[in-house]
Amino acid sequence: MAQPGLDKRTQTKVEDQSSLKGTLASVFLLGFFLIITWVGVFLLFVNRF
Amino acid sequence: MHIHKFEKIWLIFGVATLLVFLSVIGVSAFYLGNQPPSCLATINPEKVDTTAPFDKPGLNKVEGKEWDYELVFVASAFNYTPGEVEVPLGAKVKVIATTKDVVHGFNAAGTNINMMLEPGYISELVTTFDKAGEFLIVCNEYCGAGHHLMSSMIKVVE
């Protein structure tokens, strides 16, 4: 007997990998903040006796 | 194992930054010879006044060393000896200091001369005075009721 139920394939959508653009931006914002402040303190230390 | 492309980028960036920071500290410590001001030199705190070089506080010219002068300070509650000292501009000076009683600070404001003086230990720092002016020395370790009155002055003159 025909089993019409079998023809109905359930289509599972593969979701797009969640975008990490925002994470990348915030990681680099934090990274550059750390580098700039570190370099600032280091230059202050080097430039005075 | 799958690692997202962005994750690779910031992992490499983070590790590279860490390596740069650590190399700077390593070069500073092992190539330039920077070390903590108090580096295992000890003294009997009760005999500071009779122990060289603290029997002659002030600026003393020295020969045959990497530095031209030794600037000797003795701290006690609540003053520094000497209370004022003149240093010639451009002199390479080893600042040597200790305390007779409790923990004191030794900070020439606006400079990197910043040491903790602990009874029984000698704190040393080599620097070149390449900027003329008056530099106030203050105690930045709370040492008692007269802590805020404790000061000295280094005058860098041409």
Image (cartoon, helix red, strand yellow):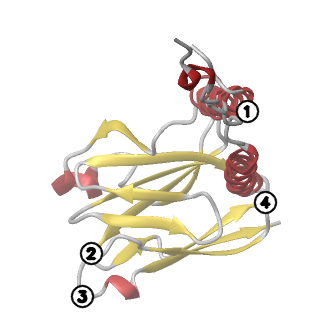
* Identity of the residue drawn at 54% across and 18% down: A3
Front residue of A21 and A26? A21
Kind of residue at badge 1: Phe
Q: Is mark 2 on a helix, strand or loop?
A: loop
How far, Cα to Cα, is label 3 from label 4? Answer: 35 Å
Q: Is residue B121 something that shows in the picture?
A: yes
Question: What is the x, y in percent for residue B105?
Answer: 39, 66
Q: Crowdedness of circle 3 by 10 Å Cα count: few (<14), some, many (20+)? A: few
Q: Quadrant of residue B84?
A: bottom right
Residue positioned most to the front: A1
Residue positioned most to the left: B46
How far, Cα to Cα, is label 2 from label 1? Answer: 53 Å
Chain bearing mark 2: B
Q: Crowdedness of circle 2 by 10 Å Cα count: few (<14), some, many (20+)? A: some
* Identity of the residue drawn at 72% across and 67% down: B156
How far, Cα to Cα, is label 2 from label 3? Answer: 7 Å
The circle on residue B89 is 4
* Identity of the residue drawn at 65% across and 34% down: B14
Q: Quadrant of residue B33?
A: top right
Question: In this rendering, which labeled residue sits more in front, label 1 or label 4?
Answer: 1
Kind of residue at badge 3: Ala
Kind of residue at badge 2: Cys
In the rendered image, the quadrant that contains the N terminus of chain B is top right
Q: Mark 1 points at which residue?
A: B6
Work out whether disc 3 and disc 1 sit on a shared chain: yes
Q: Is mark 3 on a helix, strand or loop?
A: loop
Q: Mark 3 points at which residue?
A: B145
